[in-house]
Image (cartoon, rainbow, N blue to C red):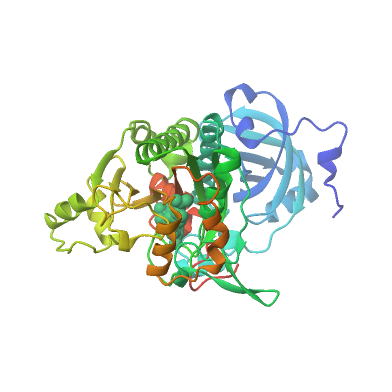
Amino acid sequence: MSAVPSLATHASSPRWVPIAQANTDVAVGQRLRVHGWVHRTRSSGGICFLVLRDATGQVQVTAKKDVLGPETFSRVEKALVESALIVEGAVASDKRAPGGHELRAEKVEVVHAADNFPIFTGQTEDFLLDHRHLAIRTREMVATMKVKAEALRAARAFLDGEGYWEVTPPILSGNAAEGGAEAFELEYFGEKAYLAQTAQLYLEALIYPLEKVYAVTPSFRAEKSRTPRHLCEYTHLEAELGWAGMAENLEAQERLVAAILHRIAERRPEELSLLGRDPKELKAIEPPFERIRYAKALELLQGKGFDLPWGSDLATAEERALTLERTAPVFVTHFPKELKAFYMLEDPEDPRTVQGADLLAPEGYGEIIGGSCRETDITKTVARLEAMNVPRAPYEWYLDLRRFGSVPHAGFGMGIERIVRWVTRREHIRDTTPFPRTPSRLLP
Ligand code: NSS
């Protein structure tokens, strides 16, 4: 095999087009070249039908022995699923072919003849996870990854348009920000370091020079919880708004979520349909989202058979019950102080609670965003760190932010895999990311 496939460079080769473009009415009659992988193949009596896929779609290729010659035809006929091919030919209508068109091969190059592909229906979940590097080629995974990319594009477009600056906070840090127990610890040239659970503390520092900032970073949680919504590494979209309070913070979140949903509905309808989500359901979701207080959430839960005393956290089951019958997200606000991180601002009207909110996705999916107003008073921040038994030294730099021009500010963090899980209706969050990190999985 030569390093560069010959058909790709041959002067007389027709133009290389994405497969989705070859499988259209406008392409009928055109001579084209496509590059792709064998999705299905069957052959009988000197004719071979292949379904070829690339990143854009699929098309049926008809390869005939009398056109290709016996040698090439034999290579094509023997090419197993996932073999890589370059095909030149003319597009014709064919109602029986997927998408309604076929490419009648005139020249075929088998760029790589694949071994027996181990991924097919009926494999166990564990087997598929062990072979994740290959299983990501399935249609469901491809559709989910495209929806995720669209979510990130939508989020960036929205935030950029709103005047936020994208920034690049560190992932390695000398402090754990969301609670020590859940941080992955590692050794950093003889010192103790942590993998970021959040970029928040750094984003807070960045509002002073830039006012409105956001970052998309991996966040790490050393949680052994094996739930369908926890990953040990996830994609965290966080924003921090200077000069903002509770109202501005919640409004930014609901507008961001709506922008993401609407753009996905607009640009990825085929992927959504394949995954069983009607794009209309996403289009119909508009701000404002309902706001309910934590105390009210407890009452609602009581009506659903949960008997929770004030101060109990809302776990997966409670969030599910609260959202199962909803079609739009809901904010739960004013959680008890003890349940939340040290940096959250006490509510002056009810000091048992903080000015923060979780945004819960409907249909039982639960939390997708956590956010709050930040404590700006240095004395109170120090007292909260002490009350939570957090050593002060690694936070001295953070306390400095309360010494030099401290202003009201607020922010939030969205779990990208969480929102994608909801939108694409995946049962497990691991199917929203190509290489999930869970307590039992570090490979592939
Ligand atoms: O812990 S959070 O609720 N909040 C923070 O980290 C804040 N420091 C964010 C901020 O204000 N800048 O996490 C935020 C979101 C949460 O709502 C989930 O959507 C997601 O991050 N999240 C997770 N996704 C997947 N797996 C795990 N384990 C996970 N933990 C949080």
User: Is residue 95 toward the left or the right of residue 85 in the image?
Assistant: left
The total number of labels drawn is 0
User: Is residue 177 toward the left or the right of residue 101 in the image?
Assistant: left
Q: Nearer the viewer, residue 194 or 361?
A: 194
Q: Quadrant of the N terminus?
A: bottom right
Relative to 152, does residue 26 appear above or below in the rendering? above
Residue 147, percent from left and from top: 50, 42
Q: Quadrant of the C terminus?
A: bottom right
Q: Nearer the viewer, residue 76 or 82?
A: 82
Image-quarter location of ligand 1: bottom left
Determine the residue located farthest toward the bottom in the rendered image: 190
One can see residue 398 in this view: yes
Residue in the image at 28% along x and 50% along y: 334
Residue 239, percent from left and from top: 50, 44
Relative to 79, does residue 444 appear above or below in the rendering? below
Quadrant of the rendered image containing residue 87: top right
Q: Nearer the viewer, residue 181 or 26?
A: 181
Relative to 64, does residue 434 appear above or below in the rendering? below
One can see residue 429 in this view: no
Quadrant of the rendered image containing residue 284: top left
Residue 39, percent from left and from top: 59, 50
Residue in the image at 49% along x and 71% along y: 391
Residue in the image at 16% along x and 51% along y: 300
Residue 6, percent from left and from top: 85, 44
User: Is residue 342 toward the left or the right of residue 174 in the image?
Assistant: left
